Image: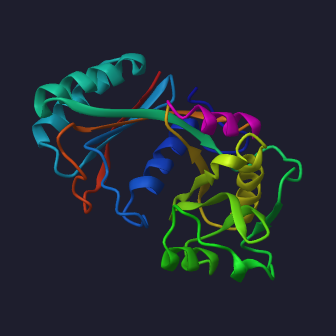
């Protein structure tokens, strides 16, 4: 899978860029990076470690990754980290290229609005239950990057916004009201958001969790190219982790 996208970088290049967008120093959120992040493109792997990981463990991971085929590296890294850190919290999910999503029909419910097109109803929108008022106002003002949403009068039904925004690119964050799901609204909002992001530097990403089937269906509806899997590994008892942690590449290999 570590191939060249049309006129662009390889999947491994893009997974490395996506890691930088999610956990890089320019990130807007305070989410702490995991102890180790692995971008697995099938026949290529990039491994990044947090700056507080024991240097001896880093050297062991680097040495092992250089000697093994990419297909077995993920499992071996997990084994090394369990010996060093104890029980692990492991999450994994697909990462997608969202630079050219498939065109979507107009929403069957509500109407589509976006950050780069003025709309007279914008100031009348209710604050959604998953946002607080100050951050919602900042979003609408464009202080958190491009967004697109499907609205019905003063209610937001589905939103795609720039959950992570950095020099390396931008990452989608989506939400749809429970009673508005199943109508393709998230796909419509995400396609419009990606179009609004075209003038930003870097690349446009969409990722999700392996267990989030509804989000994966959105990616399928948009026909997003799969870049690979992002593995996130941290000690099970770590809690929130160090918000000031930094990741750096310790190994990169391909078949």
| Residue 198 in view here | no
**As drawn, 120 above or below 108:** below
**As drawn, 94 above or below 171:** above
**As drawn, 127 above or below 10:** below
Q: Position of residue 10 (x, y in %)?
A: 58, 38
Q: Which residues are magenta?
A: 211-222
| Residue 194 in view here | yes
Q: How is the image coloured?
A: rainbow
Q: Is 172 placed left or right of 21 in the picture? A: right
Q: Total number of numbered labels? A: 0
Q: Residue shown at 56%/74% (left/top)?
A: 136
Q: Is 27 placed left or right of 98 in the picture? A: left
Q: Position of residue 170 (x, y in %)?
A: 57, 59
- The quadrant of the picture occupied by the N terminus is top right
Q: Residue shown at 25%/63% (left/top)?
A: 244
- Residue 138, quarter of the rendered image: bottom right
- Residue 28, quarter of the rendered image: bottom left
Q: Position of residue 23 (x, y in %)?
A: 39, 55
Q: Residue shown at 13%/30% (left/top)?
A: 86
Q: Position of residue 37 (x, y in %)?
A: 35, 40
- 150 drawn magenta: no
The residue furthest front is: 179
**Magenta-colored segment: predominant secondary structure:** helix
- 218 drawn magenta: yes
- Residue 147, quarter of the rendered image: bottom right
């Amino acid at each position: 899978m570590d191939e060249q996208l049309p006129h662009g970088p390889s999947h491994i290049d893009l997974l490395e860029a996506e890691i930088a967008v999610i956990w890089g120093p320019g990130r807007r959120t305070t989410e702490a990076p995991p102890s180790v992040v692995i971008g697995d493109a099938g026949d290529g792997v990039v491994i990044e470690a947090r700056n507080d990981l024991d240097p001896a463990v880093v050297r062991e991971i680097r040495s092992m990754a250089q000697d093994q085929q990419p297909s077995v590296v993920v499992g071996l890294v997990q084994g090394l980290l369990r010996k060093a850190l104890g029980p692990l919290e492991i999450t994994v999910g697909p990462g997608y290229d969202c630079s050219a999503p498939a065109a979507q029909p107009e929403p069957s419910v509500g109407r589509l609005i976006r950050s780069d097109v003025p709309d007279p109803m914008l100031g009348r929108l209710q604050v959604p239950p998953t946002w607080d008022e100050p951050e919602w106002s900042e979003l609408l003002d464009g202080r958190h990057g491009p967004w697109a949403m499907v609205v019905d009068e003063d209610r937001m039904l589905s939103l795609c916004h720039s959950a992570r925004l950095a020099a390396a690119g931008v990452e989608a964050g989506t939400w749809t009201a429970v009673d508005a799901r199943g109508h393709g609204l998230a796909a419509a909002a995400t396609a419009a958001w990606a179009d609004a992001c075209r003038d930003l530097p870097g690349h446009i990403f969409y990722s999700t969790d392996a267990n989030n089937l509804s989000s994966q269906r959105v990616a399928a509806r948009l026909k997003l190219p799969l870049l690979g899997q992002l593995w996130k590994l941290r000690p099970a008892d770590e809690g929130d982790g160090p918000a000031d942690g930094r990741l750096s590449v310790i190994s990169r290999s391909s078949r």
